[in-house]
Image: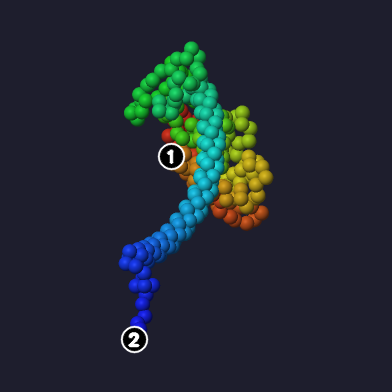
Amino acid sequence: MTSSATTPSEQLPDPLADRLEALEQRIGDLEQAVERKDERIADLETQLDRKDERIADLERRLDQHDEHLDETEKACERLERATAAALNKASANKERVTELQSRELEKGAHLREETVDEHDVEVPDGRLERLTKDDGETYFRLPESADPLDRGNVSLAYGDLLPIQQLARMHDEMRRAAANTVPTRLAAKLWQARVDDSVGDNPWENGCREIAEYVKASDLKHWIRRQETGISESYAKKLVSRVIDAMLDLSKHRLAVRKRTERKNGLKYTERRLILPADAEIPGETGGDA
């Protein structure tokens, strides 16, 4: 007698065996579906992790942008304050310049048209006159304005004067605005001392023959120290050369420098002199009248 092993489904009636086999197939399909879902879940978790990392990176970048924005806003506020201060200063400077221009026009100055706001300057009756001069430039002046040098019959426009004469006629405040270096301002003062007796401190000396007036370099050094209090003798000595250079330039070289041998205490030495030649062409002056 022989026997063979049989599966449970083979031992069951055919309908039940078929149903059990179908269930086993269904379970197998479900297990595969679960595995696929597990894989999908794992894939989604991986993607989620990457998104979390991306979000964290974006949040860090957003924080950096916020910090940069804060810095930018602070910088803008500083610029706004600086701009407001600059505008206030510009407005104050314009008012100051306009006031100085008004004074100069009342004194007979001729000012270039492009430098004057005719609606802001305050002059008698608000009247200004335009004129075009030989240099082709247009100027403002008061109608029938006086000669800038107050030389009676000599008729000169402000623009006809040498730069050194123009600076010498300015008020200290206007001169400081027009001349941005100490040597230039000192040069204007030195010229003013020569032509205006009311200045008082005049280092110029009368010359003879070919020289109308002159000032020694040593006297100029002491004069500079009297004008600029608190400076050392060595710095004043340096300023002498710079002031002389400014005088030559601003006078359009109507002035000159000469060296002369002097004798003091039995010793000879050579000293520079800033001279005004007797035949120099100075607007409003004649040779020998300085």
Left or right of 242? Residue 222 is right
Q: Where is residue 173 in the image (x, y as percent from the top left)?
A: 57, 32
Distance between mark 1 and mark 2 Cα atoms? 143 Å
Find the residue positioned furthest to the bottom.
Answer: 1
Residue labelled with disc 2: 2
216 and 169: which one is in front? 169
Element on which disc 1 rests? loop
Q: Is residue 25 above or below residue 148?
A: below
Q: Residue at x 52, y 37 (%)?
A: 80
Q: Identify the amino acid type marked 1.
A: Lys
Count up the numbered dots: 2
Q: Residue 20 carries which label?
A: none
Query: Which residue has dot 1 on it?
Result: 252
Q: x and y percent of residue 107 in the render?
A: 51, 21
**In the image, is residue 122 above or below residue 55?**
above
* The N terminus: image quadrant: bottom left
Q: What kind of element bears circle 2?
A: loop
Task: Residue 191: tell me if it is visible.
Answer: no
Instruction: Indicate which disc, 1 or 2, sits on the residue closer to the N terminus.
Output: 2
**Residue for point 46% across, 38% down:** 251
Asked whether residue 230 appears in the rendered view, the answer is yes
Where's residue 281, x and y in %?
Answer: 43, 34
Mark 1 neighbour class, 10 Å CA radius: few under 14, some 14 to 19, many 20 or more: few
Front residue of 144/64: it is 64
